[in-house]
Amino acid sequence: MTIVQSLFYAYLDEGLLPLTGYNPYHMHDYPHAAFTAFMVDDEVHGMDRGGLALQEIMFFENFASFIKPSNCLVIGNSLGWSTVATALAFGDAKVVGVDNNPNRNGLDLTNRIFEKLKLKGGAVFGESPNDLERVCSENLDGPVDFVLIDAIHNNTAIVSDFNGVNAIAAPECVYLFHDVINYKMIEGFKSIIRDSGLDGRLLTKTTSGMGVAYSKSVVSQEFVDYVTMFSDDPEIFKNYRYMIGQVADEMNGLYDEFQ
């Protein structure tokens, strides 16, 4: 069974119907339509931002085949979608998700799913970056060698989250950042790459515009080739975006004639 299937049905078994992967064009141009929200008793939770999109989970499943971490951290657990996905992707690893939401329903849900699926780790209450050292020392078996950062969405916060985990991470740690383009965190991501000496890619072809940082000396060429395939030369990206804007303006004018 694929990660997507296991993830989907794990939440469905808990009474949460995942709503994910929709084309915004089909949903009144709602920008977060692709990201994961949940329907519970005819009410939708998580529409304001949502977890990893269906397409990003599919990207992640293949991404995970190129690295073999032992100790994984997810900063920003929420309802656990990304934490469970990480544990499914890296089946032999121990995974801990951390979140500082005083409503601990998301932590409890995550831990129930971990127990049902016999995954290693779980979710705990804590604040990034202040509690990361404690959380990792208490819940992991060694230095962090994979981290997904998906908490507060601004440039200051992602740099702070990165610095907090980088201080306790293994040299071979791979860092994946959600929502870099969507939430205008490119400058923060660039500063992380510049100041850390890591290599990195802005994954322009992922739904949220994720970023990935890694030490090129310890990852395989296949890994580099895979993430490069999901990124663009900045000038090509800008030019293609401009051309799409021109076409969109022309199409809007055409539609206006038929109003």
Image: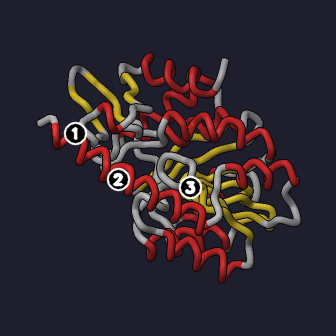
Q: Alpha-carbon neighbours of circle 2 within 10 Å: few (<14), some, or many (≥20)?
A: some
Residue carrying label 2? 101
Task: Specify whether residue 135 is in view.
Answer: no
In the rendered image, the vertical position of residue 189 relative to residue 65, given as above or below = below
Q: Residue at x 49, y 28 (%)?
A: 112
Q: How many marks?
A: 3
Quote the CA–CA distance across marks 3 and 2: 30 Å
- Considering the numbered disc 3 on the image, is that residue within a helix, a strand or a loop? loop
Image quadrant in which the C terminus is located: top left
- Considering the numbered disc 2 on the image, is that residue within a helix, a strand or a loop? loop
Q: What amino acid does circle 2 point to? A: Asn
Mark before the other along the chain sequence, 1 or 2: 2
- Considering the numbered disc 1 on the image, is that residue within a helix, a strand or a loop? helix
Mark before the other along the chain sequence, 3 or 2: 2
Residue carrying label 1? 255
Residue carrying label 3? 204
Mark before the other along the chain sequence, 1 or 3: 3
In the image, 169: left or right of 18? right
**Where does the image place residue 239, in percent across and percent down from the top left?**
52, 63
Q: Nearer the viewer, mark 1 or mark 3?
A: 1
Q: What amino acid does circle 3 point to? A: Thr
Q: Nearer the viewer, mark 1 or mark 2?
A: 1
